Image (cartoon, helix red, strand yellow):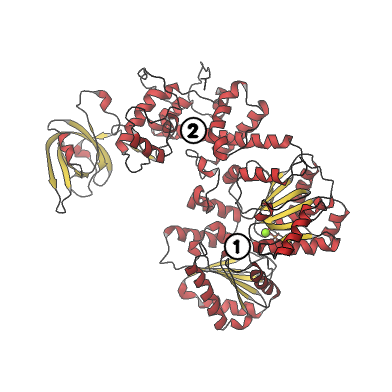
Amino acid sequence: MKAPDYTELTPPRQAFSPLPDPAPRPSRVTLQTPVRSFKGIGESRARCLERLGVRTIGDALLLPPRRYEDRRELLPIGRLRLGEFQTVAGRVKAVGTGRTRRGIPYCEAMLEDGTGTLLARWYRQPYLARTFRRGLRVILAGRVSPYPPREMMNPEHEILDTGDPAETGYHTGRIVPIYPLTAGLGQRFLRRWLADLTRELAGEIPDPLPPSVRDRQQLLPLPQAIRNLHLPEEPGHAAAGRRRLAFDEFFLFSLAILRQRAARSKAAGIAFEAPTGLVERARARLPFALTAAQERALAAIWNDMRLPTPMQRLLQGEVGSGKTIVALLAALTAVANGYQAAIMAPTEILAAQHAERARTVAEPLGIPVVHLAGGMAAPSRREALTRLGGTSACLAVGTHALLQADVHFGRLGFVVVDEQHRFGVLQRADLQRKAGHSDLLADVLVMTATPIPRSLALVLYGDLDLTVIDQLPPGRQPVTTIWIDDAERTRIETELRVRLGRGERAYVVCPVVEESAAELKAAVQTAEAYRRGPLGGFGVGLVHGRLRGAEKAETIAAFREGRIRLLVATTVVEVGVDVPEATVIVIEHADRLGLAQLHQLRGRVGRADQAAMCFVVADRTEITEEARARLETLVRERDGFALAEADLRLRGPGEFFGTRQSGLEGFSLGDLTADLRILEGARAEALATLEQAPALDGAWEPVRMAMEARWVSRLGLAQVG
Ligand code: ADP
Ligand code: MG
């Protein structure tokens, strides 16, 4: 990479006194130089560093400290405060070694400075006795014992009288970074190595960002940001440095996905004709009028469909806001144009439900619905496949298996993915290609049932256009959520008896983490207990992931029709079973589930105009602090978006989805829970940049190279442009 020529660096906003010039290096080092072969880094240290994600010098310079400790203030011994973390200087008065009663060896040193004495002890490091000779001046940083006499256990140390000033100033007497560690790699080594590396190399790193962007976003130049990260001189330095580096991550990521989106908007798609009489007839047959929010969403989708470029739109909305019918009407539009449309659900149960709804709407109009179910008998599966392989228009419904290798569509033009976060940016692009028809890319509509915090939406769905249904159908009543301890269960039974007696339905959810046999047994036993108990007469059913598809479908149908009024389920109901008569949901072991899942489950009730209830069962005394915070939030908060934000704060982005998501691991400096403003700034800059230089050429060359190095391989994004 050639260094861009920025002779006039804009002055930094944050005051920063430059470090002494780095010593000239004999051999040429670049950001891509592997850490191995670098001085002080042998095979085994290189392996340790790799565990921290550090392979090259560039990785090392961007390794963010976990936190910092301010060890600038050197206190006289007499002014040390008991119980606090402080830094102190003194002269070694006496040194010794010993063993504890358990035989653990230690080194001990007595410090004095005219104002008092301090005893320091290092366990398992008896060799330090050779370091602390009598009369040496040393600095110690550590927590002072809470009671007199003053003592420090395992403090960090630095020797002042080595005669070599370069030997000090790493671990004490400054704002000290604390790095993430891994077995075999010590804090002192890492800190010292990174400080040296920064002093020597930070100035040589070319800054890919043009000064205009840095100015607008008030960012430090890259070399200074790196110095601030590892060698902050003021408390604000580290934050300003991290801000710049976080911006880079978000900026490069935004460029990568926005470029992909731009490339797509130039691709050829199908220009569907405006909704025809067929779709209007379907609409007229609905038992309700669409809400204003649904109308707006449909209009946006139709607008996309008319364009001769492929649509990729995200349809987001609160649970029960009526996304499915919007998607169905859009799919019918494609069918009315003579194309095949596919609706993909995350589970077989939900696919069956979608198929059912699709039939009600489509079949009276003479539109065939093909349901490709998991456990289908071979002849009917063959028949379905033949049908899809032909070119006559139809509506296909199934799970993600619809796009498996042996399923061929003769004329697929429109795909709905009800995705529940299971697709990444990459898979979506794939889908669009696979679904195309004679060189035209299909229109793709992604539905997510879980509201996503804005910061995450920008990352996970930054390549999509967004439509939000921000309104529930009229007459919906908020679900009352009650947290129940094991001991208060009679309350649940009382409620169930009244509701089931009125003909309403209830879910009892026994969360199963991995469909393991033991946990499944708990669900089976729960169902048995209800069957034998006083509510047995209302009809009790059980669904779980190990049942055959037909059995599951039969049970759900019985529940829908009211032959079974109480349905015990593992979390399979989570994904969107829609039974309007269900008005109670009991969630056992609620502490095991994340907020997003709990909210999804709660959304299974309150789907009509009766008041509904959600009982979450968890013993207050037995659950973790975090689980308690989660359940309290669920009880208090009804709005899905607010809940999602809270969930992100409680669990952090990596855990947010339960599974790791491509894209999310890519950020080491940017913090998705806290840096929304930086992310938005970076995205705005990326949009402006692509407007100005769509090919990222000329002055943008370094940015393009940094982006490709960082994201194209990591996200598996197609090289575009
Ligand atoms: P989502 O997929 O957004 O969670 P659904 O599409 O499953 O929501 O809709 C939830 C329920 O509301 C369904 O029973 C559906 O038939 C019903 N519904 C959808 N739109 C309306 C509307 N405009 N008025 C009344 N009921 C509606
Ligand atoms: Mg739904």
Disc 1 marks which amino acid? Glu
Q: Residue furthest top?
A: 7
Which one is nearer the viewer's eye here, 190 or 613? 190
Mark 2 lies on a secondary structure that is helix
Q: On the rendering, which quadrant does ligand 1 occupy? A: bottom right
How far is the residue under mark 1 from the one under mark 2? 39 Å
Q: According to the image, label 1 marks what residue? A: 574
Counting from the top left corner in percent of width and height, residue 27 is at 38, 19
The answer to whether marks 1 and 2 mark residues whose Cβ atoms lie closer than 8 Å is no
Q: Residues within 10 Å of mark 2 (few under 14, many from 20)?
A: many
The image shows a total of numbered marks equal to 2
Q: According to the image, label 2 marks what residue? A: 245
Disc 2 marks which amino acid? Leu
The quarter of the rendered structure image containing the C terminus is top right
- From this view, report whether residue 322 is shown above or below residue 313: below
Question: Does residue 113 appear anywhere in the picture?
Answer: no
Q: Residue at x 65, y 41 (%)?
A: 463
Find residue 283 and report its image quarter: bottom right
Find residue 598 and report its image quarter: bottom right
Counting from the top left corner in percent of width and height, residue 15 is at 43, 26
Earlier sequence position, callout 1 versus callout 2? 2
Counting from the top left corner in percent of width and height, residue 434 is at 70, 45
Mark 1 lies on a secondary structure that is helix
Q: Residues within 10 Å of mark 1 (few under 14, many from 20)?
A: some
Which one is nearer the viewer's eye here, 365 or 290? 365
Counting from the top left corner in percent of width and height, residue 6 is at 52, 18
Q: Is residue 117 left or right of residue 173?
A: left
